[in-house]
Structures are given as C-alpha cells and as structure tokens.
Amino acid sequence: MDTIGIIPARYGATRFDGKLLADLCGKPVIQHTWENAKKSKSIEDLLIATDDKRIYNVAKGFGAKAVYTSKAHKSGSDRLTEVVSQFEAKIIVNIQADEPLLHPSMIDNIVDPLVRDKNIQMATLCHKIESEHELFDRNIVKVVIDRKGFALYFSRAAIPYKPRSIHNGNRIVNCYKHIGLYAYTRDFLFTFKSLPQSTLEKIEKLEQLRVIENGYKIKVVETKYDTVGIDTPEDLARAVEVIQGSKQLSFL
C-alpha cells in the first residue's frame, strides 16, 4: 500500500464540544468529511482514528473503518503515528475531521508533490484570501510562501502585514490562508513526532511551525477550493448555508 488517509478525531473541543457529531444537513460533520475524502483518487485506504466511544460507534454506523487510539495523545499527528505503525504505507495523509466541505482533489493535490519529488517530505494546502475579515481573523491561520512554493511562516496574525498596500483594486493580493490538510512520507512523520515542541509552535499554537523551526521544509500547494472548518456553532451554520445553496464558497 502506497498511500493511506487517516482522520484523527476526538470528541472534546474548546469552542464547540462534540462538533464532529453535530448534525449537518442530516449527517454528522465527520461523516461529510469521510465521504468526501473517500472520493480521493490518491488514497488506497481511509481510517478514522479516535479515543472516543461515541465517535467510534457513529463512524462504524456509517460504514467507516475506525480504530481506537490512546487518550494520551496531545495532537493529531501523535495519533497518526500510533495508527501508522500498523501499516506499511509510504505516504500518510492527515485529514482534519472538522472539514466537511473538503474537496477530494485537495487530497490529490498534496499527495502529488511527494510522489513526484522524493526530496519533499511534507505538503499542505493554501487558498487565496479575498476579504479583510479573513486576513485579520485570528481563528484563520495564514501562511507566507517562498518562490519555490515552500512555507516561510504560519501565523494567526495577518501576514505579510502591509495595511496600506494589501489591495489591488477590490482584491487582496499575496495573502493566503492555510488549510490544515497534510501529507507526510512515513519516515518524516516519525521524525516529526520525535522533534521537541518548538518555541514558535508554543507562541502561535501551530504544530506545523515545529517543522520549520527545526530546519525542515513544507511544500505548500495552492488550491482553488475553499472550505469551512467547523470550530464554532457559527461555522456549522455557514456550512449548512453552503450545502443548501444559499451561500457559495470561492473557487479560484
């Protein structure tokens, strides 16, 4: 097996407890995520990894492969390594469980660089920011990218910060939000787990900064598809509007 997708899933969430099992147009949030991820052409198997009986039972109920993991894990990547140790896959895709509007091609987009270039060990996604609300929203992570498409920095702040020159006509330019979908080579996933938590990671509370601060690179692929990550009840309401057709996401 070359590539597997894993959806780490826990019940608790600071701003929206139990969000993965919240109803979204007749299905729990996590089922939408799983169904969309299953349509990816790049992954050969897909699992939901959880330490919660409620999520496990619901996942089994809609036909997913679900596995129990330790409750001691502090992050989704830690949960991944426990599951991956049971498989021989070369590439592992970490799929955020709270991304019910995930487009299947987004998975294909981050797997492709690792397949084509053996020097790339980790890849993720970005999407152009089109509004000042997104740019200055600290719940939305931003990313700055170098000329070769590798991440320079991730932040909850507006980066790059050019308040008088961010616009080109009516559009914001050179500003990207990070979409938290990751692909790793098997070896690098275990390297990542072994790295000590970094200073920048602690400050920003962004796990991916550990990679950059330790001198490794993250390939960033721009996607034309936007998403709605479910962090609050308001996000859930927005996702309902998108699914029902009363609101559209940007597709660039």
Image (cartoon, rainbow, N blue to C red):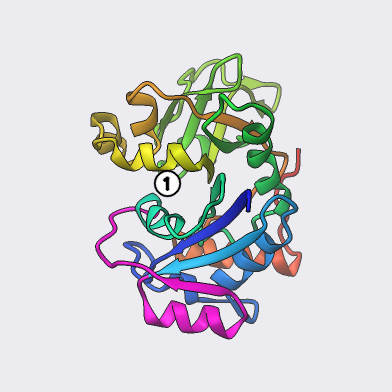
- x 53%, y 55%: residue: 229
Helix, strand or loop under label 1: loop
Q: Nearer the viewer, residue 250 or 29?
A: 29
How many numbered marks appear? 1
Where is residue 247 shown, x and y percent of the image? 71, 59
- x 29%, y 58%: residue: 73
Q: Quadrant of the C terminus?
A: top right
On whether residue 67 falls in the magenta region, the answer is yes
Where is residue 250 shown, x and y percent of the image? 72, 45
- x 63%, y 53%: residue: 1
Can residue 207 be seen here?
A: no
Q: Nearer the viewer, residue 43 or 105?
A: 43
On whether residue 182 falls in the magenta region, the answer is no
Identity, as a three-letter code, of the amino acid under mark 1: Asn
Where is residue 214 shown, x and y percent of the image? 33, 25
Tell me where residue 222 sits by quadrant: top right
Judging by the rendered image, the residue that carries numbered circle 1 is 139
Tell me where residue 169 sits by quadrant: top right
Where is residue 212 shown, x and y percent of the image? 39, 26
15 sits left or right of 225 in the view? left
Looking at the image, is 125 positioned above or below residue 101?
above
Looking at the image, is 86 positioned above or below residue 130?
below
Find the magenta span and give its range: 51-76
Can residue 159 be seen here?
A: yes
- x 31%, y 62%: residue: 14
